[in-house]
Image (cartoon, grey):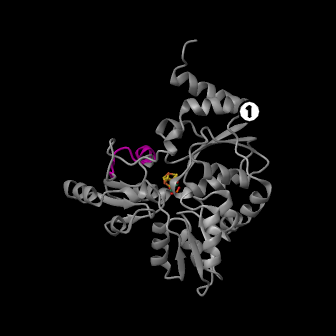
C-alpha cells in the first residue's frame, strides 16, 4: 500500500478528531508541525487548566507522560491518550516514590511542594503541586513560617528559594535539557550579537541564570519576546518554543542557546520529540496507548493539583 503523505495524515487526524470528539493538547516543546495541528498549545500550567475544562471525550496529549497523567487525574472520566509511552522525563525519573517517601520522613514537619514534572505517585505524596509559571506564587501563598520540601528540580527550587527567602529543603533533580546549556557558548553568542537579550528558563543552572536578562517559564519567555521592544533573543530553553515566538513576531531573531554537546546546535528534549504526526494518527485511530492511573493514587494526586489550580485561579494565573 502507498504511504500517506504528511498532508494526508493531517487531514485524517482532523477527520478522526471530529468523529471521535477528541482534542489535541500540545506542549510548546513539540515540533512545529504538531503545534500547528493542536487544538491548544501551552505550557504545563495552561495545559493542566485546559485538560480540566473542555467538552471533549478524548484528550490526545502531545507531550510527555507526566503531563498526560496530570490530564487523566484532572479528567478521570475522559479517555487520555499518549502517542508514545516512552515519552518520559529525566526530571520526573530523578525522583522515585520509595526514595521520596524516605526524604519526607527524614525532613518532618514540612509542606511538600512538588513540581508538575513528577509521576502520579509523587503527586500523591505531595501537599501542593506547582509549575514553573506559578512556583514562586505557590510558595508565597503559604504563611512565612511554614517549612517546605521542594521537589524534584534543584534549579527551579534554588530560583524560588532566592526569590522568596523561605525555609526550603530541595530535592537534587535536574532536567537533561536545561542543565546542559553551555555558558561559554551563550557568552560567545552574546559577544557576536551584542543587542541580543538572554532569556532563560528557571530549570537552568545558576551560572546561566546569572547572565540572563529575563528568567521565566516557557509561557513567560514567550510573553516577554512578544512585549519587549528588543529584536534579538538568545533562548535558553527547549528550542520548540521558538516556533511560537516566530509565529507571534516573525521579524525578530531567535537564537537557540546551545548545549555543551549537540549535533543540531540547539537544545531538544529527546522525550518530547518522540511524538510524531504519524504516531498521533495511529493513536487517534486505534485509541491506544491509553493512560491509566490507579484509582487510589489518582484520588490522592488530585488534591494537591486542585490546590494549585485554586491558588492560580485566585491569583489570575
Ligand atoms: P513549563 O511548561 O512549565 O515551562 O515547564 C517546562 C518543562 O520542562 C516541561 O517539561
Ligand atoms: Fe522533562 Fe526536561 Fe523534557 Fe521537560 S524538557 S519533559 S523537564 S526532560
Residue at the spot 71% in from the left edge and 34% down from the top edge? 287
Residue 245 painted magenta? yes
- Residue 138 picture quarter: bottom right
Near-viewer residue (284 or 155): 155
Where residue 186 sits: x, y (%)?
Answer: 28, 57
* Magenta residues (range): 242-258
| Total numbered labels placed on residues in the image | 1
- Residue 289 picture quarter: top right
Where is the C terminus found, in terms of image quarters? bottom right
Near-viewer residue (90 or 195): 90
From the image, tell me which residue sits under label 1: 20
Q: Is residue 283 left or right of residue 165?
A: right
Where residue 200 sits: x, y (%)?
Answer: 39, 61
Near-viewer residue (102 or 181): 102
Is any atom of residue 163 visible in this view? yes
Where residue 24 sits: x, y (%)?
Answer: 63, 40
Residue at the spot 56% in from the left edge and 72% down from the top edge? 150
Q: Establish if 182 lies above or below 316.
A: above
Residue at the spot 49% in from the left edge and 73% down from the top edge? 160
Callout 1 crowding tier (Cα within 10 Å): few <14, some 14–19, many ≥20: some
Give the secondary structure at mark 1.
Answer: helix
Is any atom of residue 316 visible in this view? no
Q: Is residue 231 left or right of residue 68?
A: left
Mark 1 lies within 8 Å of ligand 2 (Cβ measured): no
Q: Establish if 170 lies above or below 144.
A: above
Where residue 273 sits: x, y (%)?
Answer: 49, 41
Where is the N terminus found, in terms of image quarters? top right
Q: Is residue 43 left or right of residue 297?
A: left
Farthest residue in the left direction? 192
Farthest residue in the bottom direction? 145
Residue at the spot 51% in from the left edge and 45% down from the top edge? 271
Amino acid at each position: 500500500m502507498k504511504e500517506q503523505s504528511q498532508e494526508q495524515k493531517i487531514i485524517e487526524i482532523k477527520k478522526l478528531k471530529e468523529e471521535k470528539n477528541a482534542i489535541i493538547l500540545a506542549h510548546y516543546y513539540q515540533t512545529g508541525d504538531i503545534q500547528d495541528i493542536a487544538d491548544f498549545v501551552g505550557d504545563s500550567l495552561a495545559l493542566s487548566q485546559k485538560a480540566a475544562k473542555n467538552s471533549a471525550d478524548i484528550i490526545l496529549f502531545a507531550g510527555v507522560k507526566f503531563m498526560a497523567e496530570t490530564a487523566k487525574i484532572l479528567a478521570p472520566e475522559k479517555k487520555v491518550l499518549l502517542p508514545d509511552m516512552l515519552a518520559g522525563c529525566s526530571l520526573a525519573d530523578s525522583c522515585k516514590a520509595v526514595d521520596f517517601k524516605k526524604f519526607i520522613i527524614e525532613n518532618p514537619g514540612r509542606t511538600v511542594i512538588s513540581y508538575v514534572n513528577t509521576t502520579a505517585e509523587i503527586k500523591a505524596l505531595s501537599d501542593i503541586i506547582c509549575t514553573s509559571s506559578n512556583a514562586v506564587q505557590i510558595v508565597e501563598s503559604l504563611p512565612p513560617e511554614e517549612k517546605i520540601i521542594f521537589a524534584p528540580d534543584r534549579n527551579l527550587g534554588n530560583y524560588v528559594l532566592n526569590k522568596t527567602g523561605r525555609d526550603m529543603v530541595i530535592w537534587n533533580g535536574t532536567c537533561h535539557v536545561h542543565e546542559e546549556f553551555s555558558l561559554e557558548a551563550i557568552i560567545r553568542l552574546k559577544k557576536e550579537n551584542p543587542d541580543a537579550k538572554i532569556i532563560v528558563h528557571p530549570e537552568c543552572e545558576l551560572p546561566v541564570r546569572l547572565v540572563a536578562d529575563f528568567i521565566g517559564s516557557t509561557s513567560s519567555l514567550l510573553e516577554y519576546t512578544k512585549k519587549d521592544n528588543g529584536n534579538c533573543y538568545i533562548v535558553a530553553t527547549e528550542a520548540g518554543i521558538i516556533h511560537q515566538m516566530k509565529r507571534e513576531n516573525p521579524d525578530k531573531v531567535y537564537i537557540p542557546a546551545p548545549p555543551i554537546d549537540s549535533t543540531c546546535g540547539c537544545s531538544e528534549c529527546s522525550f518530547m520529540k518522540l511524538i510524531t504526526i504519524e504516531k498521533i494518527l495511529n493513536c487517534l485511530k486505534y485509541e491506544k496507548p491509553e493512560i491509566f492511573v490507579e484509582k487510589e493514587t489518582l484520588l490522592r494526586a488530585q488534591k494537591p493539583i486542585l490546590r494549585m489550580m485554586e491558588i492560580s485561579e485566585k491569583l489570575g494565573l
